[in-house]
Amino acid sequence: MIKFGPSGLCQQFAESGKKHTIEAGKWLKDLGLDCFEYSFGRGVMIKSQTAEEIGKEFAQNGIEISVHAPYFINLATQEEDKAANNHRYIFDSLRALRAFGGKRCVFHPGSPLKTPRAEAMNVLLRRFEEVLRIKNDEGFEDLILCPETMGKIAQLGDLEEVIAMCNLGDDNIVPCIDFGHLNSREKGLYFTKDDYKRTIDRLLEGVGKSKTNRMHVHFSKIQYSSGGEVRHLTFDDTTYGPEFEPLMQVFADYRLNPYVVCESAGTQTRDALAMKTYYKTLV
């Protein structure tokens, strides 16, 4: 079934007097949400015991945990030492995910830097194939890797590039479609239900029904400039998009069951609940 939840702990959580992630499981359950994304943006620094304790508490409350691997992963690097570091960041994230008892690991594909984009993408695909081989060798074949669509035009990770990555592996490589990022890349792509349908139809064609049905979704309104993403906003913003209601209508019409994570700036729990509440009116 479709799941909704926040990325990280929000302002409301702190204002309620709570301090630790382990307290968020019951808090999210009581609000009526279903999932939570734990971000390792600056590196994987959680102890296995702590992750296990958090995971146990979340499982008891029916809240599924995903993780976001460190932001500075760049699978397009030409340098072997940096490639080795990328592998470490990914597999440290998978080990923590295993300790949490979760299934999904989101990661940023990378950037071409000074290399032509097509050449950088070839390097990225080769590096990702190495990751997939090691993933199976290390016993992580049941965990799901989710390459994310990115918000800056210079970054690798447009829709077609993510589709190409998802077609390298088995059923446990599914796309992370960040609609705020795609909207930023195109400087306002999503306004209507048909705008969202075009993306979903391309996913159905490009990665198939199963992976589209189970895709990971990031959603927030994002300020953008000529280069793409600038900063995340809240659903209260009226200048930048995208709006979530047409996307929820498409999810309902297509009977999709994605894992929807809200990345609003500080109001991610409230905004995740707004998406779920609206979606429930459609089904």
Image (cartoon, rainbow, N blue to C red):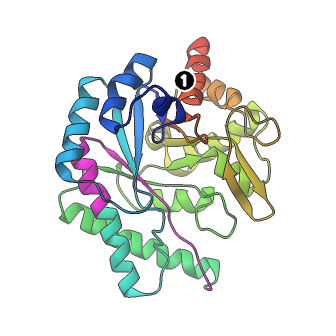
User: x%, y% of residue 229?
Assistant: 70, 57
**Residue located at (56% from left, 79% from top):** 120
Mark 1 Cα within 10 Å, few/some/many (few <14, many 20+)? many
Disc 1, SS: helix
Give the answer, above or below, for where 222 lies relative to 21: below
**Quarter that holds the N terminus:** top left
Residue 40 located within the stretch drawn in magenta: no
Left or right: 272 in relation to 65: right
**Residue located at (41% from left, 26% from top):** 34
Circle 1 residue: 273
Left or right: 94 in relation to 108: left
User: x%, y% of residue 221?
Assistant: 69, 41
Q: Which residues are magenta?
A: 92-114
Give the answer, above or below, for where 60 lies relative to 211: above
Residue 185 occupies quadrant: bottom right
Left or right: 67 in relation to 266: left
**Residue located at (46% from left, 38% from top):** 9
Asked whether the viewer can see residue 258, the reply is no
Left or right: 182 in relation to 132: right
Give the answer, above or below, for where 125 lies relative to 147: below
**Quarter that holds the C terminus:** top right
Q: Amino acid at mark 1?
A: Leu
User: x%, y% of residue 168?
Assistant: 41, 62
**Residue located at (45% from left, 68% from top):** 73
Asked whether the viewer can see residue 148, the reply is yes
Task: Count the numbered circles shown.
Answer: 1
Residue 113 located within the stretch drawn in magenta: yes
User: x%, y% of residue 86?
Assistant: 38, 72
Considering depth in this image, is 248 or 222 the residue closer to the camera?
222
